[in-house]
Image: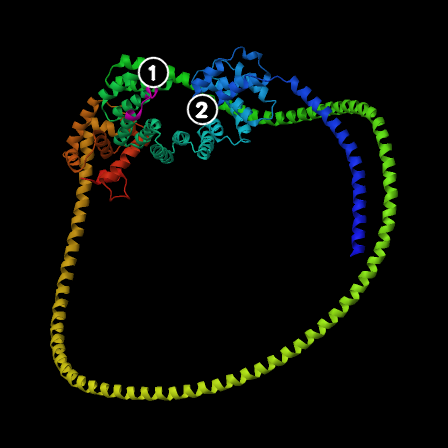
Amino acid sequence: MRNIQVSTNCQQNNIEIRKGICIIASTNAINMNRQIRFILFLFIVSLTACQKQSHILPLLQEAETLMDSRPDSSLCLLESVQSPENLSAAEYATWCLLVTQARDKNYVEHTSDSMIGVAVRYFEKQKDPHRKAQAYYCQGRVLSDLDLEEEALEAYLNAKEQVAQTPDFNLRARINNHLGSLYWKNMNQRESIVYYKEAYQAYTNDSDTAGMVNTLCNVGKSLHGLNLLDSAFIYYEKALQLANEGHAQGQRGTILTSLGNISEERGEYTTALEYYRGALESTDNPKFLDTEYYNLGDIYHVLGKNDSALFYIEKILGSENVFIQCNANRLLYQLAKESRAYDSAFMYNETYLQLRDSIEHVYRPQELERVKALYNKERVESRHYRQMQEDRIRIFVLIILVLASLIVGTFIYSYFNKKLSLQRLRNQEAQKMLDENRRQLSVKNKELSDNNVKLEMAQQSLCHIQEEKDCLVRERNEQVHILKEDNRKQQAEYERKLEEIETQWQEAIGEKEKILHEKDVLINQKDLLLSQRDQRLSSMSKNEKQYKEQIGILTDEQQKTKQEMETLCLEMERLRSEKEMQLQQELKSKEEFSSLCKMYETWQKELIGQNSCLFRIQERLILDIWKDQDWKVFMDNFDQVYPGFIRRLTDCFNLTDREIQIICLTKLGLKTGKIACVLGLGEDMTRRIKSGIRKRCFPTLTTLSLDKIIRNWY
């Protein structure tokens, strides 16, 4: 133990000497690090002191926070800034962007693109895709107000490219929505559907119910433009359901109006009128009332209620919407022509043609496609140019950093060269102390080696004692193992004998129980057989009497059945003869009926040939739109040739005057195109009306057209 304690003391002395050497070296390093840190601190403070602390930044942040909830307050804050052109470039560009956003949200019409141009030029050079997307989007809104649609398309496409790198789903939805509206305005519905669906997906990710309803309506509008009425109707119904669930009542009027338009094109005029009335009740914005008035006037005109139609159309003559004015003048022209006010009709038609020419001048779909292709080309070139610019900037920055590093390194070298001479003196003193410590360390190491020799001798004796102890333990463990093995064998033999005795006892008990069980089973079987024998004897005596009675009954029934069979055979022979006679009579009647039909058709042709009015109509000599007087003359002549046809038609079915006119012209043999020309309708509309008559009045005759049904009816 004494030797171990001596070696431990020597080790502690060595550790203390090494600590002293490390402390001296670390003290010198710490002093040098402190000087370096102090110089760097002064350099950073000097750079920071050169920068101005902006006072306008909090105002811009507050205005941007209020932009969505209170855009009017945001605009007031931004316009309160004095001399914004004196701000820094970043602050002035941000101010221009936010002012343009606030004016757009407050529905202030843009008259110049100079302000948003400042923001676009600044943020194009920055690596902030969100600000770039905002700037390009606002530029598109400004250019749209200035009727520069080609430039607006390019701005929106730039914004779409940048916003894809950000998580701002609301801005992404608005950009795609305006792109779709731009293409729809220029009659490119298929392209607009793509952008509208992207806008709907973005609004869905943003959980914006009003935006989802708006984009669903836009998709329905584009499908309606492609004449896909069923698909458009589905989207409008989905939008209406979503508006009702999300309490977006402000959009119900627009949705109901669109549903009414589709119903009117389908020929469902009563349903369309209900939708238009619902839209008028749901509309609270005065600028949408013109559309509702025009729709009501149009549907009343289709239903033949010209006074109601004129009442609503006269309300929208002063509308600011050029499309509403164009359609209103067209409808007024038709009303004036039907009422034979030809001077007014001429005036309304001239106004309609002028407005239509101005609308067609606005559409430039080919220009938009050309701009889109040019944009895709310029985008690739601009990416290459930006990449070259960035490489040049990186090289320039790297050169500046190298020069700055050389200047700073020279300054540090000159500064530390002065300190190095002082440090050398301190190092010499430290070297002297280190030599003294090394000498003391050698003396201590010699003492430590002597102690180690003594320690090795003690360890050898300890190892010898440990070996003797291990040998004794090994012998004791072997004896214990032998005793355990003998004990285990004796116990196993005893358990085996005990199991044999128990097995024999169990076999004897089981044999006894088996014999007793077999005896009980035999006794039970004997009793059961005796009881079954008694029951069979008694039942056999009863069944013998029943069999005799049933044989007598069956014999009587067999005789009756033979008599009935003979009677049925006679009846079948009589019915077969009657059926043959009836069939011969029907064939004779059919031949007579066919001859009568031919005679009737010949007679009708002679009557039509004798009637000059119907003859001219059948020969397609009258192709202009008929007036009420023309219809009256036609109906009188038609009733002379087909007496009672119209009366029976109105008694059997609930038909409108227009549907009765179509049926009468069809009975006369006119085709759909000629009927449409006489009624002043399109061929598709006339076909839909005829199809509706067939489905409603003759639902079972699905294989025949209405023309064949009417010719053979009555």
The residue to which callout 2 is attached is 68
The residue sitting at the front extreme is: 2
Q: Residue 324 vs residue 145: left or right?
A: left
The residue to which callout 1 is attached is 319
Q: Which residues are magenta?
A: 280-288
State the residue in front, 643 or 470. 470
Give the overall secondary structure of the magenta segment. Answer: helix
| 281 inside magenta stretch | yes
Residue 468 x %, y %: 76, 70
Against 68, residue 522 (above or below) is below
Residue 148 in view here? no
Seen at 60% across and 79% down, the residue is 488
Disc 2 vs disc 1: which is toward the camera? 2
Residue 116 x %, y %: 53, 17
Seen at 48% across and 23% down, the residue is 65
Q: Kindly state the secondary structure of the residue where label 1 is placed.
A: loop
Quadrant where the N terminus sits is: bottom right
Other-residue count near label 1 (Cα within 10 Å), few / some / many at <14 / 14–19 / ≥20: some
Q: CA distance from mark 2 to mark 1?
A: 31 Å
Q: Amino acid at mark 1?
A: Ser
State the residue in front, 534 or 623. 534
Seen at 16% across and 52% down, the residue is 586
State the residue in front, 469 or 48. 469
Quadrant where the C terminus sits is: top left
The residue sitting at the top extreme is: 83
Q: Which of pointers 2 and 1 lies earlier in the amino acid sequence?
A: 2
Residue 32 x %, y %: 77, 29
Residue 291 in view here? yes
Q: Residue 55 vs residue 69: left or right?
A: right
State the residue in front, 71 or 16. 16
Q: Kindly state the secondary structure of the residue where label 2 is placed.
A: loop
